[in-house]
C-alpha cells in the first residue's frame, strides 16, 4: 500500500532523513518512534506530499507521489502534531468545511458527516465551538477532518501529545477502530501507546531507520535483554521493568524509554559479537 524507497531529505548541510526504506501493507497500524528532531515529521510530510524528497521515491497504491501529488493527497488523511483547527467554528461547521475543501460531493456530505461524527464520538458536541472543547475532543476533531474524505492511508503525527491518560485511551481506541477501513502510520515518543494498537514498529534516529520489526519481536528481544545494567542506559531502570513484566508483560513495555529500546536492540548484536571473540581464543588454547 505504502512503499518508501531510499528517501533522503537535506536542508542545506543538515541531513534530516537519510536513505530510509520500508513498506506498509493495507490495513496495518504501524508505530513510528523517535525523539524530537529524529526526522519523523519530515518523513511524514514527504509521505503526505507536502514536502519534496531530496532523493528517493514514495509510492501509494503503486503511484509515485512526485508525479501524482494531487491525486495521491485524496488518498491520504493527515493529522499534524498541531492540527489547523478553526476554533471559532462549531465542530459540525469545521468538519463540513473540511469535507468541502477535500472534495467530498454534496450528495455524500450528509452521510459522511454523520458517520465521521459518530466514529469520532463527536455527536454530542457537534454544535459546540471548538475553542470550548478539551484537548482530547480537539484531537478527535482533528482526526475527523483527516478521515472525512475516506482516505486509504491515515498519517498521524503525535496524536496523543499533551493528552491526559484517559484522553490517550480514548484517542487510541478511535485510531484502532480505523484499521478495518484504512492503513495507519502514527508517530509517538512512547512505546506504551504503540504497544496498545500497532502490529509493527519503525524507529528513526538521526534521520536513519534503525528498527523495523513486529511489536512481538521487539518486545521479545527487549524482555531477553531486560537484565542489562541500567547504568549503561541513558535513563530509566530496565531491571525494574523486567521485574514488573513477571506480573504484567505490558507494564514492562510501558517502563521502557526510546533509549532503552535502541540500546537493547544493539546490545544483542554486540553480545553475539563479543561471545564470538571470546570463544575463538579459548578454542585456540585447547589446540596448543
Image: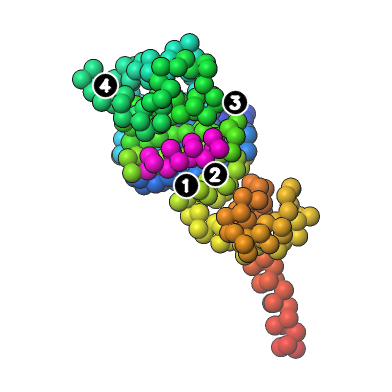
Real-space Cα separation, disc 1 to disc 4, in angstroms: 30 Å
Check contact, mark 1 vs mark 2: CB within 8 A.
yes
Q: CA distance from mark 4 to mark 3?
A: 47 Å
- State the SS at label 2: helix
Q: Is residue 19 above or below residue 106?
A: below
The x and y percentages for residue 178 are 38, 39
Could you tell me which residue is drawn at 75 percent across and 84 percent down? 285
Residue 76 seen in the figure? no
The percent position of residue 59, horizontal first and vertical second, equals 36, 37
- The residue carrying mark 4 is 110
Which residue is located at x 73 percent, y 53 percent? 237
Pair 3/1: label in front: 1
Label 1 to label 2, Cα distance in Å? 7 Å
User: Nearer the observer, disc 3 or disc 2?
Assistant: 2
- Residue placed farthest to the front in the image? 124
Q: Quickly name the residue at label 3.
A: 12
Q: CA distance from mark 3 to mark 2?
A: 34 Å
What residue range appears in magenta? 166-179
Disc 4 and disc 2: Cα gap in Å?
A: 33 Å
Q: Earlier in the sequence, mark 4 or mark 3?
A: 3
Q: Could you say which disc has been placed on residue 197 in the image? A: 1
Amino acid at each position: 500500500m505504502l512503499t518508501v524507497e531510499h528517501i533522503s531529505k537535506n536542508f542545506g548541510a543538515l541531513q534530516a532523513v537519510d536513505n530510509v526504506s520500508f513498506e506498509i501493507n493495507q490495513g496495518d497500524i504501524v508505530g513510528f518512534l523517535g525523539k524530537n528532531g529524529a526526522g519523523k515529521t519530515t518523513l511524514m510530510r514527504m509521505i503526505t506530499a507536502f514536502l519534496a524528497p531530496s532523493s528517493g521515491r514514495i509510492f501509494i497504491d503503486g503511484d509515485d507521489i512526485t508525479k501524482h501529488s494531487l491525486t495521491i493527497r485524496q488518498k491520504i488523511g493527515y493529522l499534524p502534531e498541531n492540527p489547523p483547527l478553526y476554533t471559532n467554528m462549531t465542530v459540525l461547521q469545521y468538519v463540513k468545511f473540511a469535507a468541502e475543501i477535500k472534495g467530498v460531493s454534496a450528495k455524500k456530505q450528509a452521510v459522511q458527516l454523520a458517520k465521521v461524527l459518530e466514529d469520532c464520538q463527536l455527536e454530542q458536541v457537534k454544535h459546540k465551538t471548538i475553542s470550548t472543547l478539551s484537548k482530547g475532543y480537539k484531537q478527535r476533531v482533528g482526526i475527523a477532518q483527516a478521515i472525512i474524505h475516506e482516505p486509504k492511508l491515515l498519517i498521524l503525527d503525535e496524536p496523543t501529545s499533551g493528552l491526559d491518560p484517559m484522553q490517550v485511551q480514548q484517542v487510541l481506541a478511535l485510531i484502532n477502530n480505523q484499521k478495518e477501513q484504512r492503513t495507519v502510520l502514527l508517530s509517538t515518543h512512547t512505546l506504551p501507546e504503540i504497544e496498545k494498537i500497532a502490529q509493527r514498529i519503525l524507529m528513526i534516529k538521526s534521520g536513519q531507520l534503525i528498527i523495523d520489526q513486529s511489536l512481538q519481536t521487539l518486545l521479545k528481544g527487549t524482555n531477553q535483554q531486560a537484565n542489562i545494567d541500567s547504568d549503561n542506559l541513558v535513563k530509566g531502570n530496565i531491571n525494574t521493568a523486567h521485574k514488573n513484566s513477571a506480573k504484567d508483560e505490558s507494564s514492562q513495555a510501558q517502563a521502557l524509554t526510546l533509549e532503552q529500546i535502541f540500546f537493547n536492540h544493539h546490545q544483542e548484536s554486540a553480545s553475539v559479537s563479543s561471545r564470538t571473540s571470546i570463544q575463538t581464543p579459548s578454542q585456540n588454547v585447547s589446540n596448543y
